[in-house]
Image (cartoon, helix red, strand yellow):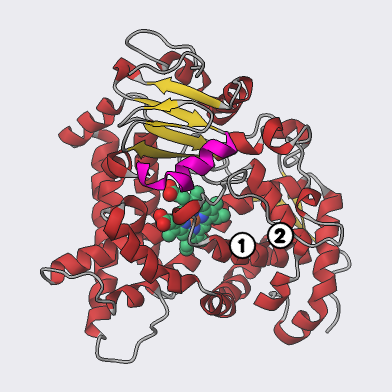
Amino acid sequence: MTNPPETPSPQSYPIIGNLLSFLHNRHRFHDWVTDMLSQTPTSTLRVCTFLNLSHGICTANPTNVQHLLYTNFPNYIKGSRFHNVLCELLGDGIFNVDGHLWTVQRKIASHEFNTKSLKNFVADTVKSEISNRLLPYLSAASLADEQFDLQAVLQRFTFANILNVAFGVDPSRLDTENSEFGKAFDLAVETTSSRFLSPVPLIWKFKRFCEIGSEKKFKDAIKVIDNYAMKIIESREDQENEIVNNSDLLSRFMSNDAVQFQDHDQKRKFLRDIVISFVLAGRDSTSTALTWFFWLIAARPRMAELIYKELLSVATAAAAEEGIVFGYDELKKLHYLHAALSESLRLFPPVPINSRLTVDDDVLPDGTHVGKGWFADYSAYAMGRMEKVWGPDCKEFKPERWLNDEGVYQPLDPFRYPVFHSGPRICLGKEMAFVQMKSVAAAVLYEYELVAADGGGTAEKMMDPPYMLTLLLRMRGGFLVRLKKRRCGPPET
Ligand code: HEM
């Protein structure tokens, strides 16, 4: 079936499809997609790949996004598109499956994200990581007036957090193994990312078949990841009859019998897939979000000051009781900070583009035809920069758009803002991510002013932001900063 003529497409040629345009714009991929989508009548494009091997659409239209993620949810699945690329890393983990396997994992895991668990997460994991590791590191760098890569520091921080949530691992204990696992994980994510974004998938499939180049390194990295996960799972099995901490994800899944297994090995593999999925979901997303947030704040001293004043207004009680790391109840009162983070996520969504596979022919609400087996993508990055969605000031960083007249944070329509996805598969870690981001932003901005080596995310730089083309919107070359201790400092307690 052919597409109705009114669905536009980037410049396309016989045989190579949209490949040339893609290669030409690779360095500014998300902005290229945004430009094209904003020039179409309904913010939707049709795409065809090399040799016409696959077809699909990409949209930034909130009504279409609602249709894909919610109204016709069963028709848009992860399917083979995700599975082929991510199978070695994620196996049958929540991120990579549909149907029954997904429902079971989602149900069990959701307990990990209720309010009580989140409060414990702040009290135990986040606070101790901030006060024992993050702040001492920042303090030393500030005293030495040393320039460092804040993106890398934040990545180590969120990695330590997620290891604790997923496996119950105290990251300070297993340092060598953790860092080997970390490196292997980085490499595995990088390879899967380039598989996903490869304009000619046949190339990586050939390299995988021959076990050469990046695919050989990937295979080795998967072995390190498997060993790490299995070691923890086995040691936990040894403690089965002892009283163990039951609040991490691994414990929850170990003690659950909703899925039947043929043998021990099958159960171990299932547990491995689940926890690794969570490490992927929770690790780089939050550190990426924080990196862009700090980049934007570094260029806006007035906003840093507004955040600082808000922190002062809730700090006295918290500081007296718990030092400078803010507790769950104080974090809830930080409306301006919440708005500033939401606004930075709008412009720099950590998952800039997301994809589904179409089960059956369908017509989107704007009239676009989508064929069976096509991919259906939505670009959260483009949506954040669309005049049709956010008005003429869409490209400005304005936390105020999230606040009502009383300065109280107001959530907006999730289909206009699918930064955390939406519908039945909405991000399970959204609240946890906000708790983490607010804790870190509060702890850092309470004590320091950021001096970015590149001057930070000024209005001009925001038009050509330094991102890399990976699954997550990582900052190219890291985020180099110096920290200046605030002159006034925290109040005396
Ligand atoms: C700023 C931080 C974060 C952002 C922007 C974010 C964004 C997203 C997005 C866009 C998806 C949909 C992915 C897809 O279906 O293809 C997703 C799913 C998910 N996220 Fe997050 N995420 C963040 C942090 C976290 C954290 C901290 C965790 C957990 C520790 C987490 C756990 C998950 C899980 C388990 C899913 C899969 C849900 C499902 O398929 O049912 N996320 N997230």
164 in the magenta segment: no
What is the three-letter code of the residue carrying label 1? Phe
In front of the other: 305 or 114: 114
Range shown magenta: 61-77
- Please state the horizontal and vertical placement of residue 17, each as a whole percent of the image: 38, 14
- Would you say residue 221 is visible in this rendering? no
Q: Which residue is mark 2?
A: 338
64 in the magenta segment: yes
Q: Which mark is residue 46?
A: none
Instruction: Using the rendered view, name the quadrant where residue 28 is placed.
Output: top right
- Please state the horizontal and vertical placement of residue 255, each as a whole percent of the image: 29, 80
Q: Contact, CB < 8 Å: mark 1 with mark 2? A: yes
Q: Which mark is residue 434?
A: 1
Horizontal side of 248 relative to 409 (left or right) equals left
Residue 131 higher or lower than 221, as above or below: below
Local secondary structure at mark 2? helix
- Please state the horizontal and vertical placement of residue 425, each as a whole percent of the image: 44, 54
Main secondary structure found in the magenta portion: helix
**Ligand 1 within 8 angstroms of badge 1 C-beta:** yes
